[in-house]
Image (tube, rainbow, N blue to C red):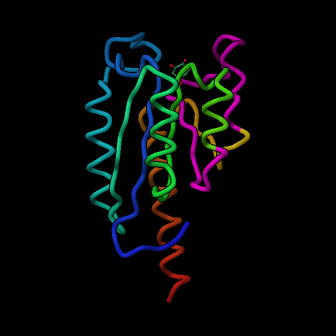
Amino acid sequence: MTASSIDPRILVLNGPNLNLLGTRQPEIYGRRTIAEMMDNLQRAAASGTPALDLLHYQSNHEGVLIDVIHEQGPDAFGIIINAGALTHYSIAVRDAIAAIDTPAIEVHISNVHVREDLRHRSVISAVVTGQIVGLGEDGYHLALEWFRRQAVQIQEESF
Ligand code: DQA
């Protein structure tokens, strides 16, 4: 990560079925839509110090997410990724994250560890900096604030 004169950019990636947030199993994922969640995150990103620039993509397609990681990931200050079900089996998403130097935080709205066995394993957790699970929408905000703290530290070290 390097300090820059423009606002550090955080790439937020949401994978399959997360476009259905709000109506999809609300007892697990809550009633907030992805648009509402990302608007909230955008506001939080812009309002802290330093301000962060947010770039959000949601796709139901593995290859699209990989293309975005290739195209937008290298220039981002950090990546927040909820890969949805791809978390549990996509070696290709893992390889894309591993292929670039940008630090990533894996977020899951639900606590995957108290759910079905098939959700206990993340194939991407070994290539991310950290993982936040089970804290709902707040997980994205905590990841964002961690990146902001990193940006502050880099700025302080450069003085
Ligand atoms: C999820 C958990 C995954 O197991 C699931 O496939 C999702 C959402 C979460 O945010 O809790 O789509 O990533």
Q: How many marks?
A: 0
The quarter of the picture where residue 124 lies is top right
Left or right of 63 in this view: 120? right
Q: Which residues are magenta?
A: 98-125
Residue drawn at x 48%, y 48% as measured from the top left: 142
Give the residue at x 28% y 42%. 40
Note whether 125 is above or below 113 in the view shown. Answer: below
Is 98 rendered above or below residue 28?
below
Q: Nearer the viewer, residue 8 or 113?
A: 8
Q: Is residue 6 left or right of residue 100?
A: left
From the top left corner, tell me how far across and down residue 117 is, in percent: 72, 12
Q: Residue 82: where, in percent of width, then height?
A: 51, 32
Looking at this view, is 74 or 133 the one in front? 74
Give the x, y percent position of residue 37.
32, 34
Image point (56%, 66%), residue name:
1
Residue 155 sits above or below residue 141 on the image: below
